[in-house]
């Protein structure tokens, strides 16, 4: 029987699951190894997978990069490679050249997260379902459940919202924060994991990722203000998504930043979204609660999501 190996390449960890055993390694990423070139990081990735993948296996790999899944080409990733490398990265070709015995399927990690979220939480009446990941980077994917598709553009992309300008009422120093992609004031600059730390620094707020949730539980005012600032671009994004797509029935929010603060994040998000601003706003707190769902740690499994996509649970399509 062919072994199935599931891989999750994130900015922080590279996880490899063979059978029921999952191993975790520091990711071959600029986030983990800032001194290394993109070429060296890719070499390290291929070397590590070469060692761990059994002969003749089927590998389903979730990748934390903007990715053309049809061509197996990566277009860029802030956390992995510090933005867009010069030219596309022929990831599938690199892996297949080293291990031609393996059947590789590359899946964008947000698409894998979306598949996992849909498997766990889609309701029978949900028409369009979106998943937002808020971790070392930020992106959204939306699935059309009736058609079982994830539509993408001609480059294979959908929902790379981390690198659009944030809508924010924060002070100018926050709006000028640099982004890992090379831009300024992007949603990722202020709402991703590194973004939260950067916002805290420019606002002079004493912040530690590990104790953020417990400090919020103690009612620390500065940290409550920090949460308000970093959630605002996400709330504005979601408000726009709901306004543009009347069939968007469910939005799951996962990733380390949101999951690590699950109750606080959800309360803050719902409070910001439920405020009605004009006659065009249809968001009551009941409707927001119907749509929004902040995931708890363990709700989303990108390894299973990558397997689901490889098995055709949702089809990523340019058509
Ligand atoms: Zn950016």
Image (cartoon, grey):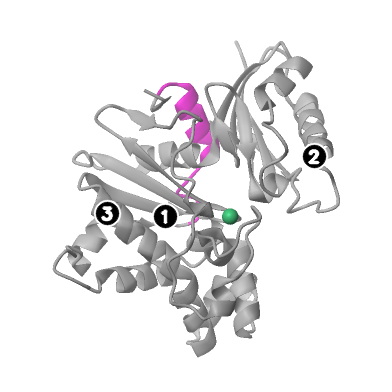
212 w.r.t. 243: above or below = below
Q: Marks 2 and 3, how far apart in space?
A: 38 Å
Rendered residue at 54%/78% (across/down): 172
Viewport quadrant of the C terminus: top left
Q: Is residue 279 left or right of residue 248?
A: left
Q: Secondary structure at mark 2?
A: helix
According to the image, label 2 marks what residue? 41
Q: Position of residue 240 (x, y in %)?
A: 31, 57
According to the image, label 3 marks what residue? 242
For the question of whether residue 57 can be seen, the reply is yes
Residue closest to the eye, 200 or 12? 200
Q: Looking at the image, is mark 1 or mark 3 nearer the viewer?
A: 3
Q: Which residues are magenta?
A: 297-312
Q: Position of residue 290 (x, y in %)?
A: 23, 57
Q: Secondary structure at mark 1?
A: strand
Q: Secondary structure at mark 3?
A: helix
The disc placed on residue 191 is none
The disc placed on residue 253 is 1
Q: Earlier in the sequence, mark 2 or mark 3?
A: 2
Q: Marks 2 and 1, how far apart in space?
A: 29 Å
Q: Position of residue 180 (x, y in %)?
A: 66, 56
């Amino acid at each position: 029987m062919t072994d199935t190996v599931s891989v999750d390449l994130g900015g922080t960890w590279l996880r490899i699951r063979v059978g029921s055993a999952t191993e975790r390694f520091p990711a071959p990423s600029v986030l983990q190894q800032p001194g290394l070139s993109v070429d060296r990081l890719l070499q390290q990735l291929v070397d590590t997978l070469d060692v761990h993948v059994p002969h003749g296996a089927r590998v389903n790999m979730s990748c934390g990069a903007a990715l053309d899944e049809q061509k197996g080409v990566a277009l860029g990733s802030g956390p992995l490679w510090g933005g867009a490398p010069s030219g596309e990265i022929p990831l599938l070709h690199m892996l297949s050249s080293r291990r031609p015995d393996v059947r590789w399927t590359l899946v964008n990690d947000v698409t894998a997260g979306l598949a996992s979220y849909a498997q766990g939480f889609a309701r029978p009446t949900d028409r369009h379902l979106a998943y937002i990941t808020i971790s070392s980077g930020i992106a959204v994917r939306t699935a059309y459940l009736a058609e079982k598709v994830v539509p993408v553009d001609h480059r294979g992309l959908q929902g790379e919202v981390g690198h659009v300008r944030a809508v924010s009422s924060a002070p100018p120093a926050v709006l000028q924060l640099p982004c890992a992609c090379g831009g300024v004031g992007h949603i990722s600059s202020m709402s991703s994991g590194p973004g939260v730390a950067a916002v805290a620094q420019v606002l002079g707020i004493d912040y530690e990722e590990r104790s953020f949730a417990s400090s919020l539980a103690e009612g620390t005012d500065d940290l409550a203000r920090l949460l308000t600032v970093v959630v605002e671009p996400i709330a504005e994004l979601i408000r726009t998504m709901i306004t543009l797509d009347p069939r968007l029935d469910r939005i799951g929010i996962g990733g380390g930043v949101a999951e690590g603060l699950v109750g606080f994040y959800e309360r803050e998000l719902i409070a910001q979204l439920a405020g009605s601003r004009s006659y065009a706003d249809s968001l009551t707190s009941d409707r927001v609660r119907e749509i929004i769902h902040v995931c708890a740690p363990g709700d989303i499994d990108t390894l299973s999501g990558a397997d689901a996509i490889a098995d055709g649970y949702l089809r990523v399509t340019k058509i």
